[in-house]
Amino acid sequence: MLNNHAVALAGSLILAASPVFVGTAQAGEFEDDSKFNLLLRNAYINRDFKDGVRDRAEWGQAVIGKFSSGFTPGLIGLGVDAHAMLAVRLDGGRGRSGAGGIDFFKHGDSGKAADDISKAGGAVKMRFSNTVISYGDQMPNYPVLSYADTRLLPETYTGTSVVSKEITGLELNLARFHAESRKSEASRDSGLKSINVLGGSYSFNDNLSTSLFFSDVEDQVEKQYLNVNYVLPIEKDSSLKLDFNGYKTKLDSAVVDRLNTQGDDNKIWSLAATYSFGSHRVTVAHQRSSGDSLLGYPYGGYQNAGGIGDGGSTVWLANSYWSDFNAADERSWQLGYGFDFAAVGIPGLTYNFAYVRGTDITTRGSTGGTEREIFNQIKYIVQSGPAKDLTFRARSSILRISEKSSDYNIGGNEVRVFVEYPLSIF
């Protein structure tokens, strides 16, 4: 069965690349700008939960192929993007797979995690001037709809997107998606009806930029997002970066009734100040959630499993690690540190640490709850030789939740190990 999936994967990639070799008389930049990349990803996540909750772990190997063509010549250029993916489960199960927060391999009707997953998709695209319109399977990356690529396979969405860069420094985005394929299965039936996105970003200069986005997930939630980012150069090797991110959300009345959130609105924002000097980076951040919804800031998940459906990475906030520190009324502070070992003769090796503490958490049964997380990550990218760009990344989180916050989150110890090897075929 695995061989059949592998053949399907290879066939999909060949079909994706085949337009490059059609119509060579007019190929032009269609062929010259085409790219075909493979990513080999080995991923392992282990969550040692506390308070009697069963531990979870998943381990798998994935091959992710992506093809992106250039555009045919002329006033209106045409092109195609395509992807094909294969994932194989390596951990053997043992009753530890299937955690919602890991979601490598979805459980079937039998209650057992799938042994492997294979899926493929593509999108046609059209360019006019500096505006591109795409339709098909895509991986959108907006602050109000951001696909998750932090597990074994990425999420994908089916629909239409428009990206316009007609004015220097200004990017405008318009999109509508009507189907979602979750990370852990091939089906596009996640329960999503539709999601509309409108927004854009503008760079005033090299140091100051801002973005504003709106989204409407049908029968779920409406969102507004604002970002302001400013970098203040201090000396040759030092700078201060200020990054503000904020969301305002309003739940649909049906969600309020179904989840008994007692209210429909949430506002959450974060402000991070990062001082970089030489090979060091120090971050101080504050994040605050308010509003009358007991759900806090809602995002991600799958609608047929009780989620929102707007992407597993739609949380562009400073204090998002294992916990997102996004509970109702929660206030959180972060102290972070990063070091680049190139300064001591080991280029490609980096280390990051963060301590985040959240207070004032409100749940249905209590107020004043707390949580805290200690985050560590070490990452190494091979700089040269046959294994150039091979990446090793290991991270751990120690998350502790107060008894008052038990309705909001679960504490535990988490370990993630990712090994990724990107290959540029052409």
Image: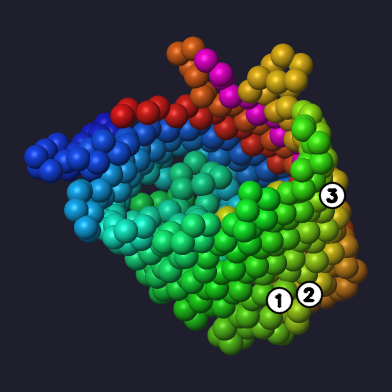
Question: CA–CA distance between discs 2 and 1?
Answer: 6 Å
Percent x, y of residue 9 = 28, 38
Whichever of callouts 3 and 2 sits on the residue coming sooner in the sequence is 3
Q: What distance separates the C-alpha of mark 3 from that of mark 2?
A: 21 Å
Magenta span main SS: strand
Of the two numbered discs 1 and 3 in the rendering, the one whose residue sits closer to the viewer: 3
The colour scheme of the drawn protein is: rainbow
Contact, mark 2 vs mark 1 (Cβ under 8 Å): yes
Q: Amino acid at mark 2?
A: Ser
Residue 300 visible to the viewer: no
Give the class, few, some or many, for how many residues have Cα within 10 Å of label 3's Cα (few <14, many ≥20).
Answer: some
Q: Which residue is mark 3?
A: 284
Q: Secondary structure at mark 2?
A: strand
Q: Position of residue 55 (x, y in %)?
A: 67, 44
User: What residue appears at the point 12 percent right and 43 percent down from the top-left corner?
Assistant: 26
Q: Secondary structure at mark 3?
A: strand
Q: Which residue is mark 1?
A: 266
Residue drawn at 53 percent across, 57 percent down: 169
* Residue at the spot of label 2: 290
Point out the image quarter for the N terminus.
top left
Stretch of the chain drawn in magenta: 371-384
In-front residue for pair 340/205:
205
Image position of 77 (left or right of 383): left
